[in-house]
Image (cartoon, rainbow, N blue to C red):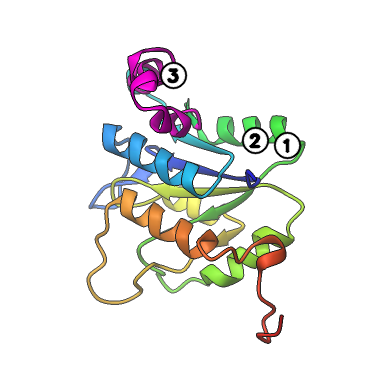
Amino acid sequence: MTRPVYLALVHHPVRDREGATVTTAITNLDVHDIARSARTYELAGYFVVTPIDAQQAIVRTMLRHWLEGAGGKRVPARMAAMQLVRPVATLADAEAAIAAETGSPPRRVVTAARADGVEVQSFADEARAIAASDRPTLLLFGTGYGLAEEVLAAADARLAPIRPGGYNHLSVRAAVAIALDRLFGDERVAAHVAPEDGSR
């Protein structure tokens, strides 16, 4: 069953290595591989966020190939994944689309490679929060050197880093797959969320 959980890959506003706010370029692999992860874990939609019209056009060209062209006929499983993809200009556009579909604005849950001394939520606790919430959830992943500070500051929750210490330079595709598996891979949501005391 499709979960009331959506994912956004944010290309703006994100940071560069100096911390400045920039817009990054879309990559084919990110669109395809994250769509496959989103379909595997039964998410409701995958937004690719960029304000650049030419970059949105690249995504739409991919979608035409897989949803209307030869790609989907040749690899139906990939077509099923690509059906989740939606290019949008801003995070506000993604949230408006979710609210229109579900009747409620989503909770914003952000991810970051570093905790930066702020309060973070464990994956297990976030799985419980998703299961308990009467609102949809929007999981935000940043490109470049991570989500801009204003996006982090506006979040309802911030997930703990996948690896809080040592080397931590995963591709965003890998980070998405790991995060989704930690949230949903053992079915800790809905009726399958184990009570905190370990009882069943």
Gap between marks 2 and 3 measured at Cα: 21 Å
Which quarter of the image is occupied by the C terminus?
bottom right
Viewer-nearest of discs 2 and 3: 3
- Residue at image location 63% in from the left, 47% down from the top: 3
In the figure, is residue 130 to the left or right of 37? right
- SS under mark 2: helix
**Magenta region includes residue 180:** no
- Residue flagged by tag 3: what amino acid is it? Leu
Foreground pick, 48 / 184: 184
- The answer to whether residue 121 is seen in the rendering is no
Gap between marks 1 and 3 measured at Cα: 24 Å
The residue beneath circle 2 is: 98
- Residue flagged by tag 1: what amino acid is it? Thr
Q: Quadrant of residue 188?
A: bottom right
Asked if the residues shown at circle 2 and circle 1 are in contact, with their CB atoms under 8 angstroms apart, the answer is yes
The residue beneath circle 1 is: 102
Asked if the residues shown at circle 1 and circle 3 are in contact, with their CB atoms under 8 angstroms apart, the answer is no
- The answer to whether residue 28 is seen in the rendering is yes
- Residue at image location 73% in from the left, 57% down from the top: 133
- Residue at image location 29% in from the left, 46% down from the top: 144
The residue beneath circle 3 is: 67
Q: Residue 19 at what x, y percent from top left?
A: 30, 52
- Residue flagged by tag 2: what amino acid is it? Ile
- Residue at image location 32% in from the left, 50% down from the top: 172
Q: Residue 64 at what x, y percent from top left?
A: 40, 15
Please give the range of residues in magenta: 58-84
